[in-house]
Image (cartoon, rainbow, N blue to C red):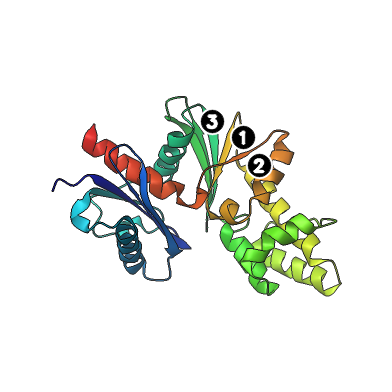
Amino acid sequence: MTPSLYLGIDIGSTTAKAVLVDREGEVRARVVQRSGYDFAAAATAVRGAALSAAGVGPESVAMVVSTGYGRRNVAFAEQQRTEILCHARGVHHFYPEALTVVDIGGQDNKVIHLGACGERLGFTMNRKCAAGTGAFIEEIAYRLDLPLAELNRLAESAEGEVTIGSFCTVFSCTEILGMARRGVPIADIIKGVFRSVVKRVAEMDALDGKVVMTGGVVDHNPIVAVMLGEALGRPVVIAPHPQAVGALGAALIARDLMLN
C-alpha cells in the first residue's frame, strides 16, 4: 500500500496536537492532549491517537513534520518547521488572502503578517514574559481556584471590569488576589484579565486588515476575539479548531513537500 496520509505534530508547552490530512488536504483526524513534562512521550501519544481515530497504521503516513516548542523531541518526524511557518500555512488553508494572524499560545504570543499567497511579510513574538499568554491565564485561574473552563462564562457574565495595572505575571497575581479579597466580583476580575491579554497583544505589532486568531486561549475563551475586535473597531475571526492550526499547517507542509 502506498502511504497517502500526512501527519503534523505540534508540541506546545501546554498541549500536544496532531493532525492527519490526506492528499487533498482534508483532515482525517485531529487530536489535542496535555503535553506534560515528557515531550517525546506526548508526541508518541498524539500520533497514536490520531492514527487510531483515522483507523490506520503508521505505514499509511508518507511524511511527518513537527513544530512547536518541543518539535525537536519528535524522533519520528522527518522534518521540523517553526511555529510561525506552520500557523501561517494552517491559516492560509482556510483564508487564502492577505491578513494578520494572532496566535496566543501557552508561553508566547505571535503576530504574523501574510500576503495574498500566504507568504510571510513579517512577524513579532513575545517571549520575554508569560504575561498575556495562556500560562498567565492558567496562573490567575489557579490563584483564584477557578476551573479554566469557567473563565469565558464568567467574563461574559461580568457587569463591570477591573483594570490590571501590572505587566508582570507575579505582580498581576498579587494585584488580582488583593481585589478578590476586597470583594471585587470575580467575573469583573476575569474580564479585566482578558482585557489585559488583549492589550498586550494589541501593543505587540500593527494588526492590519483582516485579523484571524489561533491558539488554545481563544479556543477556550472566544471572548478574547470579541474584545480584540472591540479594541480594533472591527470583527476578529477565529480560525476553525484554532488550537490545532499549527499542527494542521505542519501536516499541510508535509503534504506539500511530498507532492510538489
Left or right: 1 with respect to 82? left
Residues 17 and 37: in front is 17
Whether label 1 touches label 2, CB < 8 Å: yes
Q: Quick one: label 1 or label 2, which is nearer the N terminus?
A: 2
The answer to which quarter of the image holds residue 208 is: top right
Residue under label 2: 202
- Secondary structure, mark 3, is strand
Left or right: 224 with respect to 179? left
Whether label 1 touches label 3, CB < 8 Å: no
Q: Quick one: label 3 or label 2, which is nearer the N terminus?
A: 3
Q: Which mark is residue 99?
A: 3
Q: Position of residue 34 (x, y in %)?
A: 45, 66
Callout in the foreground (3, 2): 3
- Secondary structure, mark 1, is loop
- Cα distance, mark 1 to mark 2? 7 Å
Disc 2 marks a residue whose amino acid type is Ala
Local crowd size for mark 2, using a 10 Å CA cut-off: few (<14), some (14–19), many (≥20): some
Residue reaching furthest to the left: 1
Residue under label 1: 207
- Can residue 51 be seen here? The reply is yes
- Cα distance, mark 1 to mark 3? 9 Å
Local crowd size for mark 1, using a 10 Å CA cut-off: few (<14), some (14–19), many (≥20): some
Q: Position of residue 205 (x, y in %)?
A: 60, 38
Disc 1 marks a residue whose amino acid type is Leu
- Secondary structure, mark 2, is helix
Residue drawn at point x = 73 percent, y = 70 percent: 174
